[in-house]
Image: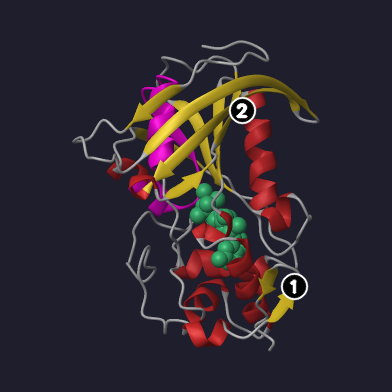
Amino acid sequence: MQGLGSTAPKQRLEADAAPQEPPFDCTEFVAETLLPTVSGKYRLRGYRHTFDGGRTYTEPSCIITGRPEGLENVPVRVHDACFTSEVLGSLKCDCAGQLQMAMGYIQEKSPGVIIYLQQEGRGIGLANKIAAYALQEEGLDTVDANRALGLPDDCREYSSVRNILSDLDIKSIRLMTNNPRKIQVLEELGVDVRGRIPCIVESQELNVGYLATKQARMQHWLSESDTDSLDGSFCYWNHDGEPLLPSAAQGGKSSGNGRLISRAD
Ligand SMILES: Nc1nc2c(ncn2[C@@H]2O[C@H](COP(=O)(O)OP(=O)(O)OP(=O)(O)O)[C@@H](O)[C@H]2O)c(=O)[nH]1
């Protein structure tokens, strides 16, 4: 374990599963520091992660209170980036509230862990999420907007979570989530999920419809009457939406040495 401000030797954390060449996923620990925040002090660990045999690169981070190393039943939040709410203060979703809730929870119930992943927009990326928001202004809900763009409902990838938990020698977790599929996907990766901690942010005027859609179409557990069953209407990786034809995104303006593609053209 590395201490405050140290520059740690790099450590590769490859999947335990059957070896492949190149490995499907690989997570590399970079360094750990101690971060003072408005919610208290947290250990912050940085990682580099590739998957798709190295074609896709992200930088997951891990926010920690206490010493969860070697423990069972550790409270863990797996949180995906939401620039719009976490940086800009958007009121359209509950993401920033969930992150704050998780940060408060692990301070209070230390030790605890938040694994923060660069998977904006459920994995479609920020620009596509903005395009989805534009369609939501025209009346589509959060699921249909993705589909209208020819994008998956959810294309998040969680192998780094398994690798980071392994790096920390965390034996089993209680996942802070309202999303049954997140539990399912993590278990399929080999993470020992022993329980669930609800992470429900009170709705407000501007996100009540969004939350209702998550509950109705993605089976999120957002009220006491929600059951643990999945009816399969929300598809994780695939969907029946029409793909966005490349021609729809063509045309553009010259911008210095680069090229600015404008969908308005
Ligand atoms: N595509 C898309 N992504 C969104 C939208 N609103 C928030 N997000 C993204 O949704 C992700 C969070 O997923 P959620 O569905 O809110 O929740 P979850 O992570 O599946 O489940 P919890 O663990 O209960 O939070 C973040 O990456 C956000 O950037 C939206 O309208 N469209």
What residue is shown at x 57% (from left), y 82% (from top)? 249
Q: Is residue 210 above or below residue 118?
A: below
Question: What is the crowding at mark 2: few (fewer than 14 residues within 10 Å), some, or many (at least 20)?
Answer: many
Q: Which mark is residue 255?
A: 1
Q: Is residue 76 above or below residue 68?
A: below
* Picture quadrant where residue 195 is located: top left
Q: How many marks?
A: 2
178 within the magenta span: yes
The single residue placed furthest to the front in the displayed view is: 257
Q: Which mark is residue 215?
A: none
Tell me the CA gap for discs 1 and 2: 46 Å
Residue 250 seen in the current view = yes
| Label 1 near ligand 1 (CB < 8 Å) | no
229 within the magenta span: no
Q: Which residue is mark 2?
A: 106
Image spot of residue 120 (x, y percent): 58, 56
Specify the color scheme: secondary structure
The span picked out in magenta is: 159-185
Q: Are marks 1 and 2 in contact (CB under 8 Å)?
A: no
Screen quadrant of the C terminus:
bottom right
Lower sequence index among marks 1 and 2: 2
* Picture quadrant where residue 116 is located: top right
SS under mark 1:
strand
Q: Nearer the viewer, residue 251 or 189?
A: 251
Q: Nearer the viewer, residue 250 or 166?
A: 250
Looking at the rendered structure, the kind of residue marked 1 is Ser
What residue is shown at x 31% (from left), y 41% (from top)? 187
Image spot of residue 133 (x, y percent): 65, 73
